[in-house]
């Protein structure tokens, strides 16, 4: 728990959508800001024009909004430190660059890309690590913006504390002269984030592991700029399903918004994302948003990579669905009740259910609530409640309990079931009683008799509890489907 008001930021580059690994630092930063009563800032780091993907800025903002990660300052809402897009802050970087030049701590890089490549190869031949500072030009030209501007580093050892990774240290050999401003006039991430974090009074930098190797160089630059570094917390990689490689778009990591479109609940996604590498020290896995805000702490985030497992996400979502009351749950299945519909979250019910009354669908929902993991499963689980599915002989031929019987044996069993159900008043209780009497009379196992009735009345590979299913289908439909099956033997 952080006592002082924290100002945290999420600083994505608009280069595409966010997957669960990419948005995790946003969730951490949001939690730290909320629990301390501070602010969460969104800053778009759009200084690499080659990598920019059009429209991804909006997409990123939508992802945060849909997950309920409301930011207090950002490009679309402004704030005391606007603008929040780096491409609109170029004058600020120039002013700070000038300070470094004036202090003799930055110089125009005179070399062509080929020359730098030559130095690199030379170092390789001599089995030396390549350091740009070994080639620092003696007489530098004034910087006219046509060449990159480099930081003149001051190599020294560093010791620092990372809230997640603990105490870290490096020697002077990792410190080098890096580019501050590129020849296209845009600053590098290495320079711009330091300026922005300082100007925006950010207290905590929470970011991914890919930046940790550069931290000593950042510390060197902070010193040259006379800026006190914020608290740093480095979140380890989220590993893909194989548990080895970093989760990445190339390996099919999905857009978080696609999970919402498939009917995963935004609050579960947040819960799941936080649980990638964090727990509160107990066995608890399902947390409400308020509990997360209260209990989350950066120093309980694991140092080693967290493992992304989609089945665990589905399990968590199912557990949440079971806890929702029926009216809430129903609203969500028809695309109401949260911000989801704005991103194209639709009505999840099968097409055939559209004209059915809400009450009927609610009864069906109550029945499948127990096994529903995410809403996109609804059509498969419920279609037979709304239309007669075609007879599927393979449901019987592929059923180990049933394929031992001949067609006429099955027909005679189903005839008996039909008579029993004809007598029934079709309440769940009455259907249950009659089915049990039928078991006794025929001496058949439930696995045989009930599977047969289930297949005949649903034509689906799986269905919820039989008596409940029959009661919802109603007597007429159930008997008519049994008759249809009887003609197929
Ligand atoms: N723009 C960087 C990225 O997209 C942000 C890193 C940071 O949080 O400082 O990875």
Image: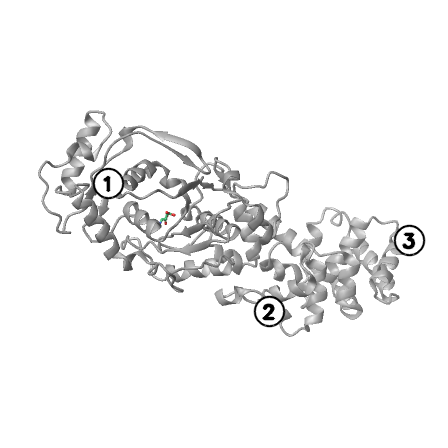
Q: Which residue is mark 3?
A: 441
Q: Position of residue 285 (x, y in %)?
A: 61, 45
Q: Position of residue 311 (x, y in %)?
A: 58, 46
- Up-down relation of residue 15 to residue 160 (above or below): below
Tell me the tag on residue 451: none
- Up-down relation of residue 246 to residue 123 (above or below): below
Q: Position of residue 483 (x, y in %)?
A: 77, 66
N-term-proximal mark, 2 vs 3: 2
Viewer-side residue, 75 vs 366: 75
Q: Nearer the viewer, mark 1 or mark 3?
A: 1
Viewer-side residue, 488 vs 423: 423
Residues at marks 2 and 3, CA–CA distance in whole angstroms = 41 Å
Protein image colouring: one colour
- Of helix, strand and loop, which one carries label 1? loop
N-term-proximal mark, 1 vs 3: 1
Q: Which residue is mark 1?
A: 178
- Up-down relation of residue 379 to residue 123 (above or below): below
- Of helix, strand and loop, which one carries label 2? helix
Q: Position of residue 354 (x, y in %)?
A: 62, 72
- Side of 171 where 359 appears, left or right: right
- Side of 37 where 249 appears, left or right: left
């Amino acid at each position: 728990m952080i006592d002082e008001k924290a100002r945290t930021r999420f600083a994505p580059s608009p280069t595409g959508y966010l997957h669960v690994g990419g948005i995790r630092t946003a969730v951490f930063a949001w939690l730290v800001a909320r629990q301390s009563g501070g602010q969460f800032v969104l800053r778009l780091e759009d200084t690499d024009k080659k990598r920019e993907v059009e429209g991804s800025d909006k997409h990123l903002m939508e992802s945060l909004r849909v997950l309920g990660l409301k930011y207090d300052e950002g490009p679309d809402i402004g704030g005391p430190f606007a603008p929040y897009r780096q491409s609109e802050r170029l004058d600020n970087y120039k002013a700070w660059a000038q300070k470094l030049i004036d202090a003799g701590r930055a110089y125009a890089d005179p070399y062509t890309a080929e020359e730098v490549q030559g130095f690199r190869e030379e170092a390789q031949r001599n089995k030396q690590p390549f350091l740009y500072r070994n080639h620092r030009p003696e007489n530098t030209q004034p910087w006219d913006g046509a060449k990159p501007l480099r930081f003149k580093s001051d190599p020294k050892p560093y010791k620092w504390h990372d809230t997640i990774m603990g105490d870290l240290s490096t020697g002077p050999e990792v410190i080098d002269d890096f580019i501050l401003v590129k020849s296209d006039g845009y600053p590098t991430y290495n320079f711009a984030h330091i300026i922005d974090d300082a100007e925006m009074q950010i207290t905590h930098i929470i970011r991914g592991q890919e930046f940790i190797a550069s931290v000593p160089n950042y510390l060197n630059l902070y010193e040259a700029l006379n800026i006190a570094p914020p608290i740093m917390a480095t979140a380890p990689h989220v590993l893909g399903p194989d548990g080895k490689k970093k989760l990445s778009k190339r390996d099919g990591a999905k857009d978080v918004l696609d999970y919402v479109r498939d009917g995963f609940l935004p609050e579960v996604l947040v819960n799941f994302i936080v649980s990638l590498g964090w727990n509160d020290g107990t066995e608890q896995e399902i947390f409400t948003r308020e509990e997360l805000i209260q209990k989350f702490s950066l120093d309980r985030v694991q140092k080693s990579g967290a493992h992304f497992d989609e089945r665990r996400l589905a399990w968590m979502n199912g557990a949440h669905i079971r806890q929702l009351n029926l009216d809430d749950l129903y609203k969500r299945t028809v695309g109401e009740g949260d911000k989801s519909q704005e991103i194209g979250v639709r009505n999840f019910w099968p097409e055939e259910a559209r004209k059915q009354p809400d009450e009927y669908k609610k009864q069906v929902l109550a029945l499948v609530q127990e096994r529903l993991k995410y809403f996109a499963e609804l059509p498969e689980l419920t279609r037979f409640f709304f239309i007669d599915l075609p007879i599927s002989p393979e449901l019987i031929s592929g059923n180990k309990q049933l394929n031992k019987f001949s067609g006429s044996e099955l027909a005679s069993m189903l005839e008996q079931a039909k008579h029993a159900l004809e007598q029934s008043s079709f309440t769940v209780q009455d259907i249950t009683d009659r089915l049990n009497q039928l078991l006794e009379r025929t001496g058949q196992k439930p696995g045989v008799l009930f599977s047969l009735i289930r297949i005949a009345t649903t034509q689906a590979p799986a269905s919820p509890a039989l008596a409940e299913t029959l009661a919802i289908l109603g007597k007429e439909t159930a008997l008519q489907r049994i008759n249809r099956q009887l003609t197929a033997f």
